[in-house]
Amino acid sequence: MTDARLVLDCAARLGESPVWDAQEQALYFVDIKGRALHRYHPESGAHAVASVAEDIGCIGLTKGRALIAGMRSGVFLIGRDGASLKKLADNAEDQSWSRFNDGRVDPAGRFLVGTIDEERRGRAGLYRLDRSGLTKLLDGLMTSNGLAFSADGAQVWHADTPRFTVTRYAYDAATDALGEGEVFCRLDEAAPDRARPDGAALDVDGCYWTALYEGARIQRWSPHGELLREVAIPARCPTMVAFGGPELKTLYVTTAGGDRPEEERDRYPHAGGLFALEVDVPGRLEPLFDPDV
């Protein structure tokens, strides 16, 4: 495995939610605070940026070539140009402190999406969106993050970032019900860097890759919760990972660059950029959101 390299110096304020589109062979990702949707084509190096109307926390691919997006005011279908096509659900929480954050399409084509309590008072939640609307699955969260599904859809990983913990739940893909949860891994909140789990993805071996916010690294954990590997990232705040490339053996890493201390920006001049590394074990293609499910 090679070290992470900078592939796109895009200076995102808060880069997040990378998603690989195998049909286009392109990576989509967002800049939450920059209110932007990015598209990067690795083969040509082409990079396009589209403005969006409000804070955009996450995206997923859909049937019909649109994107599903969790934003501040709700969940939307948007075009590849960032234009809003249809509002699917309102954010039921107070938008003065809440916006949608991490989200992922489940194996059945539903969208699981969580919120962030920007005042850190533990009022955020994890929701399921299907044709019946938005249903809360978890509450009492600080920052919903780290969603990933097992290949058979029987398990889902979820992180509550400020609590330094990743939990794995039993998941019924037929009914999208959460079952018993167990702590999968817990980072040391007393560590000097206070690295904590942010966005994540699973590889085909069932290993959980997670970005460590303020930890300047990503980690790979075994299905049994054993730390297998760490890879340094030249940014203090990696935010999420995603598999891409023709064989899904390139791991892309988004990072945060804006609103960080000046000393940190001097140390990590490419923070906010998109990084990548080659891996031996590939990821899996993401499911497509189906509004009829």
Image: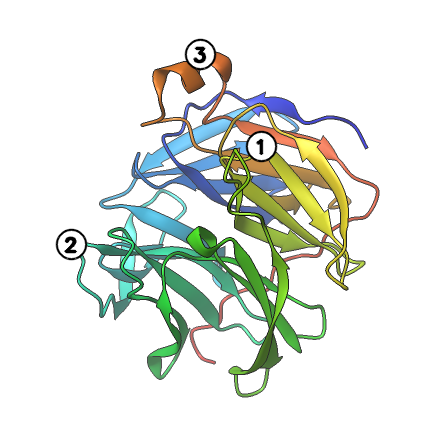
Nearer to us of marks 1 and 2 is 2
Question: Marks 2/3: CA distance?
Answer: 32 Å
- Rendered image coloring scheme: rainbow
Question: Marks 1/2: CA distance?
Answer: 36 Å
Q: How far from the left and from the top, in percent, is residue 282?
A: 78, 49
Label 1 with label 2: CB-CB less than 8 Å: no
Secondary structure of residue under mark 2: loop
Q: Please give the name of the residue rendered at 67% of the width and 57% of the height, measured from the top-left corner.
A: 285
Query: In the rendered image, which residue does mark 1 sit on?
Result: 41
Is 53 in front, or is 210? 210
Label 2 with label 3: CB-CB less than 8 Å: no
Instruction: Answer yes or no: is residue 89 visible.
Output: yes
Nearer to us of marks 3 and 1 is 3
Secondary structure of residue under mark 1: strand
Instruction: Answer yes or no: is residue 62 visible.
Output: no
Query: In the rendered image, which residue does mark 3 sit on?
Result: 266
**Mark 1 is on which residue type?**
His
Among the 4 quarters of the image, the one containing residue 96: bottom left
Sequence-first tag of 2 and 3: 2
Q: Is residue 245 left or right of residue 293?
A: right
Is 173 in front, or is 115? 115
Sequence-first tag of 1 and 2: 1
Q: How far from the left and from the top, in percent, is residue 289?
A: 49, 67
Secondary structure of residue under mark 3: helix
Q: Is residue 213 above or below residue 129?
A: above
**Mark 3 is on which residue type?**
Asp
Q: Could you classify mark 1 by the number of other residues whose Cα lies within 10 Å: few (under 14), some (14-19), or many (20 or more)?
A: some
Sequence-first tag of 3 and 1: 1
